[in-house]
């Protein structure tokens, strides 16, 4: 009898071992096939050189724009850029999207493990109706059970691996989006700062000309008082003076609006910026030459180009996810547990003995054979979306080159414009000086003075705008080249304040640190060309 029990036990464990071998073998075989296309880096139309290549304002060499705003040698601008990086709310939102995408990637990875896992137990008091023909001593009894059940759909067709590949691309695209927001933020701060200094210069020019025109008005009034000129000269002087004085409030409106814009970029409510803007008040001076690299650098540096490529890669994997539905799915199911009752004198405590053990394990298959039309059309939907992303990628590359060309053209031509205007301002100052002397001596009429005043004011104002265009042209070029996102390297995507709030609500583990960008784990899709510092996480 003992040998019989031993044989039964041996046979039982032998069956369990065979089941385990079957499960492990099936899991290994499930890694061998993956339907759907493998993503290939899309081809984009890229020019060999810039249109202005060879211009003396452009210097050949590798473009390095990590801290491009430092070329203006303006400590105030540098301070504003770093303050915006720390406080800007749109950038913080982009950082939170990175964490969201990383958590979504964790969800996709979880599908590699048994999709259904449940441990349960129950204790119940049962009553069997007298009308049922059960041969029991009593029709009431207690029963209890403890068990574990699991179901594991094997990844025979690569559905889950494609899903991870898609989530991986979406995660990396969110990092690229963060970098793109950062590039735009830095450029917007620099542009707002240049505009503030430009408007301040325009106001100073207007006030300086107001003083000149008041002097001319006094001279005209004195000459009219002594009867040497008509009242017309006084009226003309007052007309020009009033027009110039009226420009100051209009410029002040622009200054207030630009400062409010800067406040928002800095993550601050509208308010005085005197402390932050303390320092040099001149329009930032651009360097004589700029390094812009070659057009091909855009594919590596610009975050929005990387984002477009990664978004396409994520969508490409969705085709494989959809195609996997065309094939049967294989699932391993298993249940193990113990059941006990107090029927016929038994005890509930026997649940912890071997005699109450029950288990089942085996494969299951499911095949959606009657809705191929829906599945096939879903594959087509995913493929059409991929093609849209590929065309969008090409469009982004074209627009990027156009933006760089625009910035270079503005930078170069504004330099020539400013050179001519400096000569115009110098000539205008001399013309006004001579006109005033001749008017005092009575050998020139007041119209000559008015013309000289207006020409000088216009030339000075145009020079200020041209000087600003040199700076904004270079800012546009650096923005278009994708410079500035590197300052986030080694730093958190989310501010310390947001991290503190999130930690109070949820256990985020190590995902709130920049360490979430780690080298690629073996067995997952390669991401070698996805950007200079953007790396897939390690699972």
Image: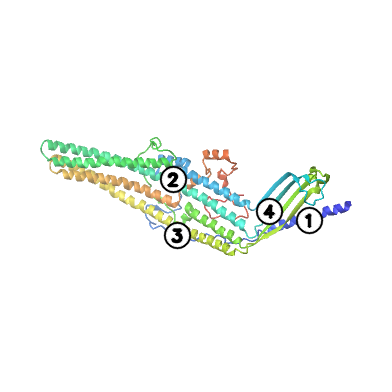
Q: Which residue, given by chain and number where applicable, does mark 1 sit on?
A: 15
User: What whole-number distance in Å separates the C-alpha atoms at marks 4 and 2?
Assistant: 51 Å
Residue at the image point whose x is 43% and y is 50% from the top: 479
User: What whole-number distance in Å separates the C-alpha atoms at marks 2 and 1?
Assistant: 66 Å
Residue 513 locus on image (x, y percent)? 56, 43
Q: Which of marks 2 and 3 is in front?
A: 2
Q: Which residue, given by chain and number where applicable, does mark 2 sit on?
A: 186
Residue 390 locus on image (x, y percent)? 49, 60
Q: Which of marks 4 and 2 is in front?
A: 4
Q: Which residue, given by chain and number where applicable, does mark 3 sit on?
A: 46
Which of the labelled discs sits on residue 504, or is there none?
Answer: none
Q: Nearer the viewer, mark 4 or mark 3?
A: 4
Give yes or no for contact between labels 4 and 2 (Cβ–Cβ under 8 Å). no
**Image side of residue 385 versus residue 159, left or right:** left
Between discs 4 and 3, the one toward the N terminus: 3
Can residue 513 be seen? yes
Density class for disc 3 (Cα within 10 Å; few <14, some 14-19, many ≥20) is some
Between discs 4 and 2, the one toward the N terminus: 4
Can residue 282 be seen? no
- The front one of 324 and 53 is 324
Residue 381 locus on image (x, y percent)? 53, 61
- Which element is circle 3 on? loop
Residue at the image point whose x is 18% and y is 36% from the top: 218
Density class for disc 4 (Cα within 10 Å; few <14, some 14-19, many ≥20) is many
- The front one of 118 and 196 is 118
Q: How is the image coloured?
A: rainbow
User: What whole-number distance in Å separates the C-alpha atoms at marks 4 and 1?
Assistant: 19 Å
Which of the labelled discs sits on residue 151, or is there none?
Answer: 4
Judged from this view, the residue extending furthest toward the front is: 131
Q: Is residue 285 above or below residue 60?
A: above
């Amino acid at each position: 009898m003992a040998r019989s029990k031993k044989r039964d036990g041996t046979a039982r464990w032998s069956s369990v071992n065979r089941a385990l071998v079957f499960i492990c073998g099936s899991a290994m075989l499930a890694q061998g096939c993956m339907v759907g296309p493998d993503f290939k880096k899309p081809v984009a139309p890229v020019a060999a050189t810039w249109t202005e290549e060879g211009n003396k304002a452009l210097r050949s060499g590798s473009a390095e724009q990590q801290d491009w705003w430092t070329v203006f040698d303006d400590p105030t601008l540098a301070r504003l850029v770093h303050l915006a990086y720390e406080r800007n709310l749109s950038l913080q939102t982009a950082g939170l999207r990175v964490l969201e995408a990383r958590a979504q990637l964790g969800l996709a990875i979880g599908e590699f493990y048994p999709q259904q896992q449940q441990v349960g137990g129950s204790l119940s008091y049962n009553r069997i109706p007298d009308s049922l023909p059960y041969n029991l001593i009593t029709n009431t009894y207690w029963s209890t059970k403890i068990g574990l059940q699991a179901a594991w759909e094997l990844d025979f067709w690569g559905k889950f691996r494609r899903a991870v590949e898609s989530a991986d691309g979406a995660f990396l695209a969110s990092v690229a989006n963060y970098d793109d927001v950062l590039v735009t933020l830095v450029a917007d701060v620099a542009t707002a700062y240049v505009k503030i200094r430009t408007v301040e210069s325009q106001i100073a020019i207007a006030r300086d000309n107001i003083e000149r025109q008041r002097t001319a008005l006094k001279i005209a009034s004195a000459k009219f008082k002594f009867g040497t000129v008509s009242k017309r000269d006084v009226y003309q002087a007052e007309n020009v003076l009033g027009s110039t004085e009226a420009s100051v409030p209009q410029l002040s409106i622009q200054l207030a609006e630009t400062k409010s814009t800067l406040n928002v970029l800095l993550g601050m409510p509208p308010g005085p910026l005197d402390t932050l803007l303390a320092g040099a008040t001149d329009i930032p001076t651009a360097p004589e030459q700029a390094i812009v690299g070659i057009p091909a650098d855009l594919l590596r540096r610009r975050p929005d180009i990387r984002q477009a490529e990664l978004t396409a890669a994520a969508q490409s994997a969705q085709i494989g996810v959809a195609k996997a539905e065309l094939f049967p799915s294989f699932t391993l199911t298993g249940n193990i547990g113990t059941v006990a009752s107090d029927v016929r004198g038994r005890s509930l405590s026997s649940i912890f003995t071997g005699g109450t053990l029950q288990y089942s394990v085996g494969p299951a298959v499911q095949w959606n054979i009657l809705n191929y039309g829906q599945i096939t059309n879903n594959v087509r939907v995913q493929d059409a979306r991929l093609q849209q992303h590929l065309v969008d990628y090409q469009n982004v590359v074209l627009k990027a080159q156009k933006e760089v060309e625009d910035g270079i053209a503005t930078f170069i031509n504004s330099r020539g414009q400013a050179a001519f205007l400096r000569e115009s301002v110098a000539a205008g100052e001399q013309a006004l000086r001579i006109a005033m002397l001749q008017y005092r001596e009575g050998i020139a009429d007041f119209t000559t003075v008015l013309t000289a005043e207006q020409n000088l004011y216009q030339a000075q104002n145009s020079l200020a705008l041209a000087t600003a265009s040199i700076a904004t042209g270079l800012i546009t070029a650096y923005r278009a080249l994708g410079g500035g996102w590197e300052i986030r390297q080694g730093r958190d995507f989310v501010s310390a304040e947001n991290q503190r709030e999130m930690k109070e609500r949820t256990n985020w583990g190590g995902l709130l640190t920049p360490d979430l960008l780690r080298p690629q784990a073996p067995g997952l899709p390669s991401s070698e060309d996805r950007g200079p510092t953007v790396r897939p996480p390690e699972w």
